[in-house]
C-alpha cells in the first residue's frame, strides 16, 4: 500500500486562520470593531493556562481582541456566575469560554448553562447542542468542528462511508456523531458510536471507512483494529513519560501511529493534527458570533 496522506493540522489550520484573518481585516478596514474573545480561567491549572495562552496568541495574530480573566481557585460558584452574567451583558464581547475543568466545588453544568448561547463559542450550551441536532445554525464544539474543517481542507470523501467514533463525550464523540450523520458535506455517513460498554470494540472499528478515536487512552487503537485503507482521525492527547524528551514526557494520541499509519489511506498525527484544528475552530466560532450577533454584522 502507498504511504498514507498525513492530515496535517498545521497546514489546514493556517489555511483556515488565513481566511478568517482576511475576513476580519476587511471588516475592520471598513470601520467595524474587531471581534473580541474572552477566556475565563479559574485557579492555576497548568494545562488550562497553556490552552488559553495558545488560543489568545492565535486570536491576536489574526486581529481578534483577546482578554483573559483569571479568578482564584477558591472563587465561589455564585461569583463565577456573576462574571458569566457580566460577560453575557457586555456588548463589546462577542464570545467567551470558561476553561474546563473547574474546581470540584463548582458545577460545570451550572456554569455552561448560564452562558448566553449566542456567546457560547465552545458550543457546550444545551441550546447549541439542540440546534446542532436540528441542523440549525449553532456554535459547534471546537474539536468536532476542527475535524470537519480538516476533512474539508483535504477534501476527504465522506458521503456513504461508515464512520465509527470511539467515545461519546458531550464535547467530542456526541457532536462528532451528529456532524458525520447530517445531510451535508462533510457528513452523510452511516455512523456507529462506541464507548466503554461496547463489546468487541475491534469488530466495530474494523468496519470503519472513517475511524475517529476519542477515548483518551494512549496508543489504544492498534493495526489489528483498523480496516486497510481507512481514514483515521486521532483526537487523543495524553502525556506519557518519555526519558528521551527534555520535558520528560511525550504527547501521544489514542492511535498507535507507527503501526497504524502504514495501513491507512490518511491519518492525523499527534501532536500536529486535531489539536491545532481545535484552536482554529474556536476562532471560527468567535468570528461567526461576531458576524451573527455582534459588530461584524
Ligand atoms: P472523555 O470525556 O473521558 O470521554 C471518553 C469516551 O471514551 C467516553 O465516552 C468513554 O466511554 C470512551 N471510552 C473510554 N475508554 C474506552 C474503551 N476502552 N473502549 C471504548 N470506549 C472507551 O474524553 P473526551 O473529553 O471526549 O476526550 C477524549 C480524548 O481526546 C482525550 O485524550 C482528550 O485529551 C482528547 N481531546 C483532545 C482535544 C484536541 O483538541 N485534540 C480536545 C478534546 C479532547 P463511556 O462514555 O462509556 O465512559
Image (tube, rainbow, N blue to C red):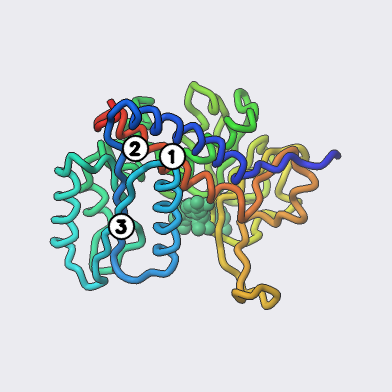
Answer whether labels 1 and 2 touch (C-beta < 8 Å): yes
Specify the label residue 253 is tagged with.
Answer: none
SS class of the residue under badge 3? strand
Outermost right residue: 1
**Where does residue 91 sit, x and y in percent of width and height?**
18, 39
Badge nearest the viewer, 3 or 1: 3
Q: Is residue 84 left or right of residue 144?
A: left
Quadrant of the snapshot with the C terminus: top left
**Residue drawn at x 31%, y 54% as measured from the top left:** 39
Tell me how far mark 1 sits from mark 2, CA to CA: 7 Å
SS class of the residue under badge 1? helix
* Residue where numbered disc 3 is placed: 68
Q: Nearer the viewer, residue 95 or 174?
A: 95
Q: Nearer the viewer, residue 290 or 238?
A: 290
**Where does residue 155 sit, x and y in percent of width and height?**
63, 28
Tell me how far mark 2 sits from mark 3, CA to CA: 25 Å
Badge nearest the viewer, 2 or 3: 3
Quadrant of the snapshot with the N terminus: top right
**Residue drawn at x 45%, y 34% as measured from the top left:** 20
* Residue where numbered disc 1 is placed: 175
Tell me how far mark 3 sits from mark 1, CA to CA: 27 Å
Residue 157 appears in which quarter of the rendering? Answer: top right
Q: Nearer the viewer, residue 29 or 250?
A: 29
Badge 1 residue CB within 8 Å of ligand 1: no
Q: Earlier in the sequence, mark 2 or mark 3?
A: 3
SS class of the residue under badge 2? helix
Would you place residue 188 above or below residue 145 in this image? above
Q: Earlier in the sequence, mark 1 or mark 2?
A: 2
Amino acid at each position: 500500500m502507498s504511504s498514507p496522506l498525513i492530515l496535517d493540522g498545521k497546514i489546514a489550520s493556517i489555511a483556515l486562520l488565513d481566511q478568517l484573518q482576511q475576513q476580519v481585516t476587511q471588516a475592520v478596514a471598513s470601520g467595524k470593531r474587531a471581534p473580541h474573545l474572552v477566556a475565563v480561567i479559574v485557579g492555576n491549572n497548568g494545562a488550562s493556562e497553556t490552552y488559553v495562552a495558545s488560543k489568545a496568541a492565535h486570536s491576536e495574530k489574526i486581529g481578534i481582541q483577546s482578554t483573559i480573566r483569571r479568578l482564584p481557585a477558591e472563587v465561589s460558584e455564585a461569583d463565577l456566575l456573576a462574571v458569566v452574567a457580566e460577560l453575557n451583558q457586555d456588548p463589546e464581547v462577542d464570545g467567551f469560554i470558561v476553561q474546563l475543568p473547574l474546581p470540584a466545588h463548582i458545577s460545570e453544568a451550572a456554569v455552561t448553562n448560564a452562558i448566553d448561547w449566542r456567546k457560547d463559542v465552545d458550543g457546550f450550551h444545551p441550546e447549541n447542542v439542540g440546534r446542532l441536532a436540528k441542523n440549525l445554525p449553532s456554535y459547534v464544539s471546537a474539536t468536532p468542528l476542527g475535524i470537519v474543517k480538516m476533512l474539508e481542507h483535504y477534501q476527504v470523501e465522506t458521503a456513504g462511508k461508515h464512520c465509527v467514533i470511539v467515545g461519546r463525550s458531550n464535547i467530542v464523540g456526541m457532536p462528532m456523531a451528529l456532524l458525520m450523520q447530517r445531510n451535508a458535506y462533510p457528513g452523510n455517513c452511516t455512523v456507529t458510536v462506541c464507548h466503554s460498554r461496547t463489546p468487541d470494540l475491534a469488530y466495530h472499528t474494523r468496519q470503519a471507512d472513517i475511524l475517529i478515536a476519542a477515548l483518551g487512552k494512549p496508543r489504544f487503537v492498534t493495526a489489528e483494529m483498523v480496516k486497510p485503507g481507512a481514514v483515521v482521525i486521532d483526537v487523543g492527547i495524553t502525556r506519557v513519560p518519555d526519558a528521551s524528551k527534555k520535558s520528560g514526557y511525550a504527547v501521544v494520541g489514542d492511535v498507535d501511529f507507527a503501526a497504524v499509519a502504514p495501513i491507512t489511506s490518511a491519518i492525523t498525527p499527534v501532536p500536529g493534527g486535531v489539536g491545532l484544528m481545535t484552536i482554529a475552530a474556536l476562532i471560527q466560532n468567535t468570528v461567526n458570533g461576531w458576524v451573527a450577533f455582534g459588530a461584524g454584522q
